[in-house]
Amino acid sequence: MAKIQMKTPLVEMDGDEMTRILWKMIKDELLLPFIDLKTEYYDLGLEYRNETDDQVTIDSAEAVKKYGVAVKCATITPNAARMPEYNLKKMYKSPNGTIRAMLDGTVFRAPIIVKGIEPYVKNWKKPITIARHAYGDVYKATEMKIPAAGKCELVYTPADGGETVRETIHDFDGPGIIQGMHNVEESISNFAKSCFNYALDTKQDLWFATKDTISKKYDHTFKDIFAEIYEKEYEEKFKEAGIEYFYTLIDDAVARVIRSEGGYIWACKNYDGDVMSDMVATAFGSLSMMTSVLVSPHGYYEYEAAHGTVQRHYYKHLKGEETSTNSIATIFAWSGALRKRGELDGIDELIHFADQLEQACITTVESGRMTKDLALITTIENPTVLNTEGYIKAVRETLEQRLK
Ligand code: NAP
Ligand code: MG
């Protein structure tokens, strides 16, 4: 069989620990035999980040701006324990944070649905994709403990020397607490555009919800910016694609989400997204089955698994013990990136291959062959538990049959 040819390289960001092991296995078993794989390789493994003072992370994000599509392996975000373990020069920031800041993107998380791994919410039939605004609000807030009686105000001092504006927040009679938070129009607009673009891309409805009835200026501004951009730039395109933009109050949204059968994107403000993504991920069954893609308003895409480097399994692997690590979300990061590359470069075989690879992962599990994490929660009777490599080999067999 002739290998599928690529035009533009993918930006490949290698990573750490168990997912780094998966990375190589996936390439060797599931990609290189079928594709003349073109990538521009960046090693975001912690050792090389340390060697380059984290310059490699910045270079990799620049490469995404150049080529448009990236696939990323999970990486360690250093904490105190990692300092001696990797002999670090400093406590580097999270690569995902650095890349997100440079690409100004929104992260979309969607579960991979497989028969036999049933959501806790029985009417959920299709994925629910959560888009979380990743800037501002309570995550960039200033807080104070108020020790005793006194007045707290919001004060705006215009940079151009205009008149200062004051609003009383509260006249305290005794001790209390106070918080000031912000957002900026540009970030909200970019969030909205990323959401509208991703909805068009994936042909799914877009839901957005805030508490605009209570927060008449703050949350209402989110609602207004979304509405304005939608009317100006997306309404026509949504009609053509046969999809809908739907705004409602956050309380109403959570009720509707539970009653729904899924199959849409739920855009959330920063805090709502933080909380709801954990709720939705857990309700769908498993963290190891969650995909993640960073979409920038300028049309750059970076695909990855939502889980981390699976450190506990890696330490077992280092001791020579057998592991049963689920590679599905990492495989889907590759298939997502390859499909997007295929779409942008007009390579139908690459799109077809990405579809087949994903179906091979799914049908392998549905035939009862899976890693331990899934075996523990499946409704399939007597599943065959495979080790890390065994599952990837099983997917290879299924894939070869499908491609025949
Ligand atoms: P984790 O790697 O997501 O793993 C947490 C636990 O979830 C694992 O110990 C395992 O449970 C289970 N699990 C996760 N993925 C699995 C898979 N593919 N197959 C089977 N089981 C899986 O989270 P962590 O241990 O808290 O974090 C480890 C490192 O990852 C940290 O250094 C963190 O900074 C980093 N991290 C990176 C990213 C990213 O790059 N996007 C995201 C999150 C965390 P059992 O041990 O019970 O089997
Ligand atoms: Mg959270």
Image: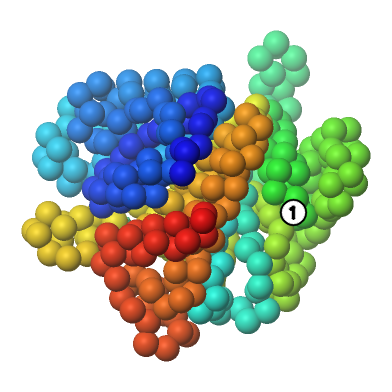
Residue density around tag 1, few if under 14, some if 14–19, many if 20 or more, within 10 Å: many
| Residue at 60% in and 48% down | 352
Pointer 1: what residue? 204
| 394 with respect to 158 (left or right) | left
| Nearer to us in this view, 311 or 229 | 311
The amino acid type, in three-letter code, at marker 1 is: Gln
Q: Position of residue 30 (x, y in %)?
A: 39, 49
Q: Is residue 218 visible?
A: no
84 on left or right of 66: left
The extreme front residue here reads 1
Residue 112, relative to residue 353: is it above or below?
Answer: below
Q: Is residue 95 left or right of residue 302?
A: left
Q: Would residue 259 be visible to someone looking at this image?
A: yes
Residue at the spot 27% in from the left edge and 36% down from the top edge: 45
Residue furthest to the bottom? 381
Q: Position of residue 367 (x, y in %)?
A: 46, 76
The total of numbered circles placed on residues is 1
Residue at image location 66% in from the left, 67% down from the top: 126
Closest to the observer, 142 or 100: 100
- At x 79%, y 45%, the residue is 223
User: Which image quarter: residue 251?
Assistant: bottom right
* Front residue (pair 221, 252): 252
